[in-house]
Structures are given as C-alpha cells and as structure tokens.
Image: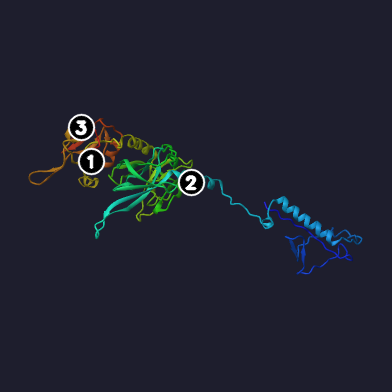
C-alpha cells in the first residue's frame, strides 16, 4: 500500500516570531535531496489554541536552516523506505476490483467447466459446379462436451446430421478428427470419439435432473454463431415439457425449459446448475425469428445418461417399435374419431405379424380405413405422441395388448414388440 506522508513545515528568519505569518514566494524551490524536491506553494497546517485562551508570546527562536532541511529529508526518506514503494508509486493509491459473491461463483463456474466444452464443425462434401472439383466445406457448427477420459464427446444429433467429416476443437484450440460412435434420432443425442491425449480431456461433472425446481439458476455454455465459449445465465422456467425430435418427429418427454439465451451454435452444449453439474443438453429454441426469444429447451441428463451408455457400449439404442406407419393427427381428427390410424403395417413387422390391418383401396378406388389404435395396455391413445410415450415405457420382446377400432367394433390384439432396425 502506498503511503502518503504529509509534513507541515514552517520556515522563519532569525527575526520572525513563531506564531507570526511568514511568506514563501510561489516560485521558490527548496531542494531536500537529489531525487526529491518540495515546490512552493506548499500546504502548511497550523493548529491554533482555543480562541478563548490568550496566545502566549514565546521567545524568539533561531533554528539553523540546514538542520531543518536535513531532518525533513530524513523523515521523507524513512517513510518511503518503510512503505517499500518507489518514489513515483508511493503517492498513488489503487483500489482492487471487487466482485460480489454471486459474481465470483459464476466466474469460477465458467472457468472450471469451460475446458469440458468443445466446438464441433460439420463438414460436407460438395462438387464445384464449374470445375467439378470435390470440395469439403463447413455446413454447420455446434457445441458438445467431454463425457469421459476415453475421448467420447456428447452432442445433439442435428449438429452432426448429414456430415461427411467432423472436426472437434478443444478448449486449448487443438483440433481433432472425430468419428461417430452412435446416435439416437428420436431423442436428438449423438456420441463422437476423438483420439486426444487424456490430459487434454476433462469430463464434465454429471448431475441429476429428477429433483430440479422451477426458479433455480442455470448456466449455458456453448459457441453461439461460432463465437468461442460463451456463457449465458437464466433460471428454469418450466419442467416436464415435451418437444418433437427434429429428425423423426418422435416426442421427447420431460424436457427442461429455461430463459437462458440459447442461440444457433449453442446446440449440444451443456446446461449446468449452480454447482457446475450437468443437468441437460441445450437442444432447441422456440422463436419465430430463429433468434433467442427467452424460451429454450434442454434434454434432461437423466434421459441422456441411459442413451449415452447404450451408444458407447453397442453403438445404437435399442428401442421397441410396433412397426407401423400412421396418419397425421389432423387427418384422424377430420374423421371425427380419436386414436392412431394405421396407414401401413408391413407383414414382416410386429404389427403385421399380429394381424393389424393397413389402410388400402378397393377395386373401385375407394379408401378403406385401416385399424385405429385406441389404447395400448389399457392406456388411452389419442394421437401419435401418446403412442410413442407408451412405447418408451416398454421393452423389446414385451407383449402388449393393442386395442383397435376396426370398422364399427373394437378388438384387442396381442403384439410382441421388436427392436428398431439399424439405421445407416
């Protein structure tokens, strides 16, 4: 800490009184040492006795000027020596930047978790229209995060969809080629793998999303619009939302809604709680303009956990299906019925083997409606989302009872669920 020394000095001629005012010319320079000068006018402090008491007249004193200058110089030199500062900084007082406790916590969270967030570039092969040369050009980008020390990177499926080549950039700006381990189109989750040194990989702490509360603080880290490592903050605005997968239209349940800004490029990045633990993957925004409008959605980490484990172990997610194609919900509503209309039930699929009937035309070209599924295992089905929600709770090889409306009567048909075919 710089120390400022204030010295009150009084100079007199031999004939002057101690309490009589003395005058120093404004241009007078008094040399104290080789490196320190006092330039008049100088601040003088004089403590006067109480005005009620008479001021005694002291006898005239004569102090040698050389002795006074020597004492003053020694006092200033001692002050500078004790303060351990140079002559220029000794008189400068600086105040350090002070942050509030919540600001310090946010800064610490960003610094500790940024090394776990990566930047993903999606490259596509295109042919030049004039030269016919094959070029590899970026067609999109997004975010992701390190899952483990083995080099597995988790992101959204729509970030890597249609890519011929993928590049992953770590926090230290080192870039590696990435290969796809597996993906789940229905839940918009994908896992990549990079051959990076383990000392450069810092897995993100995994949290729990089952006990989240509306109103608690959340933090999103990503690369919006290609800007490297951006932090946005907000709160949980809602829980147990439902959105549709951009790839298959299949519903994703228990989605987290947040007002933390999620822009294009944030997709695949982590959503963290105030402890820095992963609670979701930023996946979508709801905005007519395409920019952040305060409504963002994240896939909960409890859903992601099981999907990533299956992708890492088997390269795919085993999910049961009925093996049907069904009509859009609006078409069924126009018929005045509630349920899922079967458009096609291939003979080699679970529904076809069980005897569900497809929609077809007769010899005169008239449309004959197929079965309309109204319930599965006594759980009501009013639209396609209800059917997907029920199937997500079932397992491969499980027998379910499907109730259908066939013509003017209902039937219950047992169906054995089969795994979803492999996707290229």
Work out whether residue 334 can be spotted: yes
**Residue marked by disc 3:** 412
Q: Position of residue 303 (x, y in %)?
A: 36, 38
Q: Position of residue 164 (x, y in %)?
A: 29, 48
Residue found at the very far front of the displayed protein: 34
368 or 68, which lies in front? 68
Q: How is the image coloured?
A: rainbow
Residue found at the very far right of the displayed protein: 59
Q: Earlier in the sequence, mark 3 or mark 1?
A: 1
Q: Callout 2 environment at 10 Å: few (<14), some (14 to 19), or many (20+)?
A: many
Q: Callout 1 environment at 10 Å: few (<14), some (14 to 19), or many (20+)?
A: many
133 or 258, which lies in front? 133
Q: How many marks?
A: 3
**Residue marked by disc 2:** 110
Q: Are marks 2 and 3 in contact (CB under 8 Å)?
A: no
Q: Distance between the Cα atoms at labels 3 and 1?
A: 15 Å
Single out the mark in the foreground, 2 or 3: 2
Q: In which image quadrant can residue 396 be found?
A: top left
Single out the mark in the foreground, 2 or 1: 2
Residue 340, disc: 1
Kind of element beneath mark 3 = strand
């Amino acid at each position: 800490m710089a120390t400022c020394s204030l010295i009150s000095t009084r100079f007199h001629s031999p004939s002057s009184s101690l309490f009589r005012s003395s005058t120093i010319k404004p241009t007078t320079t008094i040399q104290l040492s080789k490196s320190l000068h006092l330039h008049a006018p100088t601040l003088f402090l004089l403590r006067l006795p109480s005005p009620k008491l008479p001021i005694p007249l002291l006898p005239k004193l004569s102090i040698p000027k050389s002795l006074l200058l020597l004492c003053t110089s020694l006092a200033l030199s001692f002050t500078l020596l004790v303060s351990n500062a140079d002559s220029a900084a000794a008189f400068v007082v600086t105040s350090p930047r002070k942050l509030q406790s919540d600001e310090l916590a946010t800064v610490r969270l960003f610094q500790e978790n940024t090394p776990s967030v990566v930047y993903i570039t999606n490259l596509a092969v295109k042919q030049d229209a004039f030269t016919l040369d094959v070029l590899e050009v970026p067609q999109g980008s997004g975010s992701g995060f390190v899952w483990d020390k083995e080099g597995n990177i988790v992101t959204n499926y729509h970030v890597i969809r249609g890519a011929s080549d993928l590049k992953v950039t770590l926090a230290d700006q080192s870039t590696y080629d990435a290969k796809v381990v597996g993906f789940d189109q229905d839940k918009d989750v994908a896992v990549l793998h990079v051959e990076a040194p383990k000392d450069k990989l810092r897995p993100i702490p995994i949290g729990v999303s089952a006990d989240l509360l509306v109103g608690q603080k959340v933090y999103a880290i990503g690369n919006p619009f290609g800007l490297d490592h951006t932090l946005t903050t907000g709160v949980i605005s809602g829980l147990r939302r439902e959105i549709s997968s951009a790839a298959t239209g299949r519903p994703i349940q228990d989605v987290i809604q947040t007002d933390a800004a999620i822009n294009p490029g944030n997709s695949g990045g982590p959503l963290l709680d105030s402890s820095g633990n992963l609670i979701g993957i930023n996946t979508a925004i709801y905005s007519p303009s395409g920019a952040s409008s305060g409504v963002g959605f994240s896939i909960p980490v409890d859903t992601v956990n099981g999907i990533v484990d299956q992708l890492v172990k088997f390269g795919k997610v085993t999910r049961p299906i009925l093996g049907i194609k069904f009509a859009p919900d609006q078409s069924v509503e126009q018929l005045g019925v509630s349920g899922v209309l079967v458009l096609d039930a291939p003979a080699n699929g679970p529904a076809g083997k069980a005897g569900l009937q497809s929609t077809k035309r007769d010899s005169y070209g008239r449309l004959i409606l197929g079965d309309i599924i109204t319930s599965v295992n006594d759980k009501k089905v009013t639209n396609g989302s209800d059917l997907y929600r029920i199937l997500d709770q079932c397992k491969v090889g499980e027998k379910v009872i499907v109730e259908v409306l066939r013509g003017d009567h209902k039937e219950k048909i047992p169906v054995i669920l089969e795994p979803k075919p492999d996707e290229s």
